[in-house]
Image (tube, rainbow, N blue to C red):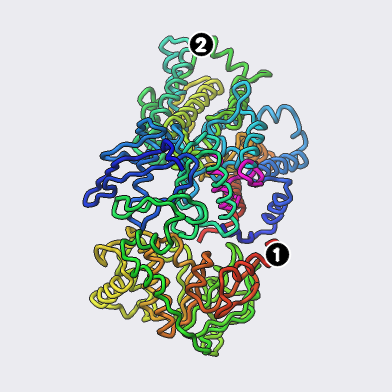
């Protein structure tokens, strides 16, 4: 392949690092993400007194645990070369499902269990359809999004408050030292990290993202990998739904509105290219934290309008996409 | 040699597609420890036979035995498990994963249920060392040279304990040195008792590595011979299904047209990036060969001359007048035509018909505001389909559906139709079959006879020697030397490519 010189000095500098063996090429997007995260954090620490407090770090994690959970699953999907648009609606569905079941007298634990099962099964179904009929993931999960959201609204259009002692206890822990949502996120991220890096399934996901036909010829059971990847994503979305009910003490059919797009943005900012085959869980966690940091920093900087947050994310996303293109060493024709 | 029990044996394989008997009772026998060439023109049934052996398709009749046992692999993966591995022309591995992971995907050594990354690395290094390749196994496969990727595919097959290795045109994108290394590995594998099926369009390579040759034509096996007892000419005759005399005529077809001293195109000090400065003269009625390893700057030179890439310094003169050749439109107007290397990506418009593809350049020269009538296009296309013997049911067939060799002929026809004064051919015979190759070589001779100045790029040194009266050898982006007339010999070209003793 012809390597053309990059357009930007910054990219060239990064590539020099790479050439000198200090940074392997796969790690460059990750390094950029972590670099941005650290720079952002340092800037905030300097600009806003009191930013370096446990309270802020807590807020950061609590406020983004649900998004983070969705991103773990989304990372697998995107590495495999797919996309999952159904996750936001899946959050809404599991949230309202849990609330409605508890309202009807269920104990929260089996309600959580059922929501997680539905999430995983829904994802597995979409994965099966995508593989069996060679359908574009974009469309199948788009359909899933409509089905989940419609189903959620069918359960209840209005938000349902969850009244159960266990749920209240868990929700109260949310403001204590060990917030359950954060525990879920950290455990899921750790598990995701290990699975992606140290299991045959994880490596098969990367191989699939590198090229389906090649993966098949190398003996990867493509069907199984795809089904599991979407099942993981659905499971993560349902977990995020559980986290949402704990945070709000209620179930809401519109919970997780546009969360799929936030998740895609965070994963891409985390250094996972949308084309698949590369990326890492560490990057995704960094991407989620960047997301959270911006949100955290804006009000302190006196910016209260939410559109500035969107604009910052949009700019960052664009920057990262250009960075990735630059590192590939070729430009679109 | 006593005929040992065959390792892989196919008997009476039949595969019928609507309208074609792709395999018509083909037999094939592979012994353990031999490298066996499978030869034939495009469409002779080689690919279908290979697919039937490797599980990519199920034959309608006949049976395949591996080590005496009947096998019916239903997929390439199943064939792999049985011990038949295939290395395709396009490497079918994951470019995004490291070389080590590619070698061991699905069989990574584990500890406590998790992949032992260090053990993966160690084992991968051992596999590559066994093949005589030194490469950083931690690097992503896609960043390594094609030759190493090819070796990785072989290494993967080895680690799968393959007993039969099928190499489907593995050398078509390798340069001479890489090919030699591949052959070294193949020989040592055969010596260890593996049976290797080798498919190639390069006849010379058959004699380099293969002990026996199976020749196919029209879905049947027409000959199985020891390579030692099969003269090259007879092999060509068998493949084409012609008599020895006709084959000889094809080989001799390009009697060299004596080139005049008149310079049609003169390039001085062309430079772009790491290629250059390059000086060269293309003479009216002469063919200048451009030889060198992959990456020596052959393609870049042709692209600069044709204006496909802008040269950073230097100039191009046509008929003594300096001409700006960029954008390519200017070069085309001056009578320069480039037939690029990657015909799929850069030249053939697969969705357009053969007729439209051929008429493109003529139309471009005339200007788009003066459309050529459909009938005129038809006549033009039919004339070239006849004269170049393009195998197509009709000129309205989409060009993308033709075989590789025929696509290449369509691209050639396009530029010939525009009647260029200078024709730059970048690897025009790469990956096409022997018959088409001979025709293209002959065609270059005809063009020279009509006074066209030709630049001919090829990785096959023998071919450059056959076609060209002068050869410019490039090395690392610079001219390493020029040969002409009697001095154009394979040995002399190779010496220049290698840099006479110094390591390239």
Please state the horizontal and vertical placement of residue B402, each as a whole percent of the image: 33, 60
Residue B233, placed above or below residue A178: below
Q: Nearer the viewer, residue A57 or B114?
A: B114
Q: Which of label 1 and label 2 is nearer to you?
A: 1
Between B194 and B122, which is closer to the camera in this rendering?
A: B194
Q: Work out whether A258 lies above or below B36.
A: above
Residue A298: percent from left, percent from top: 65, 41
Q: Which mark is residue B501?
A: 1
- Note whether B352 is above or below B218 in the view shown: below
Q: Does label 2 lie on the same chain as label 1?
A: no
Would you name the residue on which mark 2 appears? A164
Secondary structure beneath disc 1?
Answer: loop
Label placed on residue A25: none
Badge 1: how crowded within 10 Å, few (<14), some, or many (20+)? few
* Quarter location, residue A310: top right
Secondary structure, mark 2, is loop
Pointers 1 and 2 in contact (C-beta within 8 Å): no
Residue A297, quarter of the rendered image? top right
Residue B200 x %, y %: 45, 55
Provide the chain ID for the residue under circle 2. Answer: A
Residue B106 lies, in percent from the top left, at 53, 32
Q: Is residue A268 above or below residue A59?
A: below
In this figure, what is the number of numbered marks?
A: 2
At horizontal 26% and vertical 78% (from top left) the residue drawn is B376
Please state the extent of the stretch shown in magenta in the rendering. B130-156
Q: CA distance from mark 1 to mark 2?
A: 85 Å
Mark 2 surroundings within 10 Å by alpha-carbon count, few (fewer than 14), some (14 through 19), many (20 or more)? some
Work out whether residue A259 can be spotted: no
Q: Chain of mark 1?
A: B
């Amino acid at each position: 392949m012809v390597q053309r010189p990059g357009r930007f000095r910054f990219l060239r500098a990064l590539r020099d690092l790479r050439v000198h063996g200090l940074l392997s090429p796969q790690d460059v997007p990750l390094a950029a993400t972590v670099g941005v995260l650290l720079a952002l954090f340092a800037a905030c620490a300097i600009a806003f007194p009191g930013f370096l407090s446990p309270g802020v770090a807590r807020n950061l994690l609590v406020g983004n645990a649900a998004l983070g959970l969705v991103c773990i699953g989304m990372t697998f999907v995107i590495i495999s070369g797919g996309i999952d648009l159904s996750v936001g609606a899946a959050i809404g569905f599991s949230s309202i499902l849990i609330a409605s079941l508890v309202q009807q007298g269920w104990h929260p634990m089996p309600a959580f269990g059922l929501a997680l099962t539905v999430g995983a099964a829904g994802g597995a179904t979409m994965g099966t359809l995508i593989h069996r009929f060679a359908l574009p993931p974009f469309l199948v999960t788009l359909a899933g999004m409509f089905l989940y959201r419609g189903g959620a609204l069918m359960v209840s259009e209005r938000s349902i408050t969850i009244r159960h002692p266990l749920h209240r206890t868990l929700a109260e822990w949310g403001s204590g030292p060990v917030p359950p949502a954060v525990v879920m996120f950290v455990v899921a991220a750790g598990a995701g990290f290990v699975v992606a890096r140290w299991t045959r399934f994880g490596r098969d996901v990367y191989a699939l993202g590198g090229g389906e036909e090649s993966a098949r010829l190398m003996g990867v059971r493509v069907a199984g990998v795809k089904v599991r990847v979407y099942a993981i994503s659905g499971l993560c979305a349902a977990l995020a739904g559980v986290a949402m009910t704990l945070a709000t003490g209620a179930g809401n059919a519109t919970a997780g509105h546009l969360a799929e797009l936030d998740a895609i943005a965070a994963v891409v900012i985390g250094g996972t290219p949308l084309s698949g085959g590369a990326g890492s869980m560490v990057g995704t966690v960094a991407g989620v934290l960047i997301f959270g940091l911006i949100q955290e920093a804006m009000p302190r900087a006196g910016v209260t309008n939410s559109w500035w947050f969107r604009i910052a994310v949009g700019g960052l996303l664009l920057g990262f996409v250009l960075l990735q293109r630059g590192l590939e060493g070729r430009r679109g024709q | 040699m006593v005929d040992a029990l065959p390792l892989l044996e196919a008997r009476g394989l039949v595969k019928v597609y609507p309208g074609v008997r792709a395999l018509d009772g083909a037999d094939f026998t592979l012994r353990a420890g031999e490298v066996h060439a499978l030869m034939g023109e495009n469409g002779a049934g080689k690919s279908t036979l290979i697919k039937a052996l490797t599980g990519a398709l199920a034959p309608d009749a006949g049976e395949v035995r591996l080590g005496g046992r009947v096998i019916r692999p239903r997929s390439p993966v199943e064939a792999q498990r049985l011990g038949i591995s295939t290395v395709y022309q396009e490497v079918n591995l994951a470019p995004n994963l490291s070389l080590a992971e590619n070698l061991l995907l699905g069989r990574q050594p584990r500890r406590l249920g998790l992949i032992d990354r260090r053990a993966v690395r160690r084992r991968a290094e051992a596999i590559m060392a066994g093949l005589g390749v030194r490469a950083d196994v931690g690097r992503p496969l896609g960043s390594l040279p094609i030759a190493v990727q090819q070796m990785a595919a072989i290494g993967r097959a080895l680690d799968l304990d393959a007993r039969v290795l099928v190499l489907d045109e593995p050398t078509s994108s390798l340069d001479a040195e890489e090919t030699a290394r591949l052959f070294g590995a193949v020989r040592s594998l055969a010596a260890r008792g593996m049976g290797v099926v080798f498919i190639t369009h390069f006849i010379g390579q058959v004699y380099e590595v293969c002990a026996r040759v199976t020749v196919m034509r029209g879905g049947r096996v027409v000959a199985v011979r020891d390579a030692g007892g099969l003269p090259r000419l007879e092999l060509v005759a068998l493949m084409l299904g012609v008599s020895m005399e006709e084959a000889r005529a094809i080989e001799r077809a390009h009697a060299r047209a004596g080139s005049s001293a008149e310079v049609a195109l003169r390039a001085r000090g062309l430079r772009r990036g790491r290629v250059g400065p390059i000086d060269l003269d293309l003479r009216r009625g002469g063919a200048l060969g451009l030889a060198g390893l992959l990456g020596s700057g052959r393609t870049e030179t042709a692209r600069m001359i044709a204006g496909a890439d802008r040269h950073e310094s230097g100039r191009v003169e046509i008929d003594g007048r300096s001409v700006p050749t960029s954008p390519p439109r200017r070069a085309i107007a001056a009578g320069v035509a480039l037939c690029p290397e990657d015909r799929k990506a850069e030249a053939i418009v697969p969705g357009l018909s053969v007729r439209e593809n051929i008429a493109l350049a003529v139309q471009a020269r005339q200007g788009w505001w003066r459309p050529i009538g459909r009938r005129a296009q038809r006549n033009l296309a039919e004339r070239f389909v006849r004269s170049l013997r393009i195998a197509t049911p009709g000129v309205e067939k989409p060009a993308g559906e033709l075989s590789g060799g025929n696509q290449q002929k369509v691209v050639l026809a396009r530029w010939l139709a525009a009647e260029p004064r200078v024709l730059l051919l970048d690897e025009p015979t790469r990956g096409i079959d022997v018959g088409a190759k001979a025709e293209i070589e002959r065609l270059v001779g005809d063009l020279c006879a009509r006074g066209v100045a030709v630049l001919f790029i090829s990785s096959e040194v023998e071919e450059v020697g056959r076609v060209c009266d002068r050869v410019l050898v490039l090395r690392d982006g610079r001219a390493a030397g020029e040969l002409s007339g009697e001095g154009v010999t394979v040995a002399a070209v190779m010496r220049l490519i290698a840099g006479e003793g110094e390591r390239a």
